[in-house]
Image (cartoon, rainbow, N blue to C red):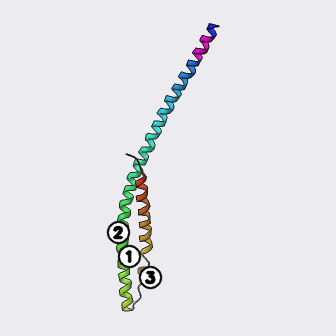
């Protein structure tokens, strides 16, 4: 009977050691995957920062275009002349879209919690 108990104890230890090995292996893989996605997020945050700078510049330029368009439309109206259709196209839609995108990107970048 003591051989049987000894065998059972040994097999139990073997199973437990196997579980420990499995856990260590999974923990290493999880840490590797974590590092990979954090690196990707960090890269994305860098690209998002660049996009925010570009959107800020675009928004300022589109605001300038909108202001000039309004000024030109007012002057044309005072003079009683029609503007070409290409000039009549509103800059406001592009300006609004750029600002909306800029606000969205600023909101996203605040949520990044990486390096």
Q: Which mark is residue 66?
A: 1
Of 11 and 40, which appears nearest the observer? 11
Query: Mark 2: few, some, or many residues within 10 Å (few <14, many ≥20)?
Result: some
Magenta-span inclusion, residue 33: no
Q: Which residues are magenta?
A: 5-11
Which of disc 2 and disc 3 is earlier in sequence?
2
Of 90 and 115, which appears nearest the observer? 115
Mark 1–mark 2 distance (CA, rounded to whole Å) = 10 Å
Q: Residue at x 37, y 56 (%)?
A: 49
Query: Mark 1: few, some, or many residues within 10 Å (few <14, many ≥20)?
Result: some
Magenta-span inclusion, residue 6: yes
Q: Residue at x 41, y 67 (%)?
A: 99
Residue 8 image offset from top left, x and y in percent: 61, 15
Mark 3–mark 1 distance (CA, rounded to whole Å) = 15 Å
Q: Quadrant of the C terminus?
A: top left
Residue 44 image offset from top left, x and y in percent: 42, 51
* Secondary structure beneath label 2: helix
Query: Label 3 belongs to which residue?
Result: 85
Q: Residue at x 51, y 29 (%)?
A: 23
Residue 65 image offset from top left, x and y in percent: 36, 75
Give the quadrant of residue 16: top right
């Amino acid at each position: 009977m003591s051989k049987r108990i000894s065998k059972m104890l040994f097999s139990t230890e073997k199973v437990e050691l196997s579980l420990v090995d499995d856990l260590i292996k999974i923990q290493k893989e999880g840490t590797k995957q974590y590092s990979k996605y954090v690196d990707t997020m960090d890269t994305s945050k860098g690209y998002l920062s660049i996009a925010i700078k570009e959107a800020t510049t675009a928004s300022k330029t589109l605001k300038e275009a909108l202001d000039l368009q309004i000024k030109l439309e007012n002057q044309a109206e005072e003079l009683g002349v029609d503007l070409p259709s290409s000039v009549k196209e509103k800059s406001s839609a592009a300006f609004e879209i750029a600002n909306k995108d800029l606000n969205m990107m600023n909101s996203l970048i605040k949520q990044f919690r990486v390096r």
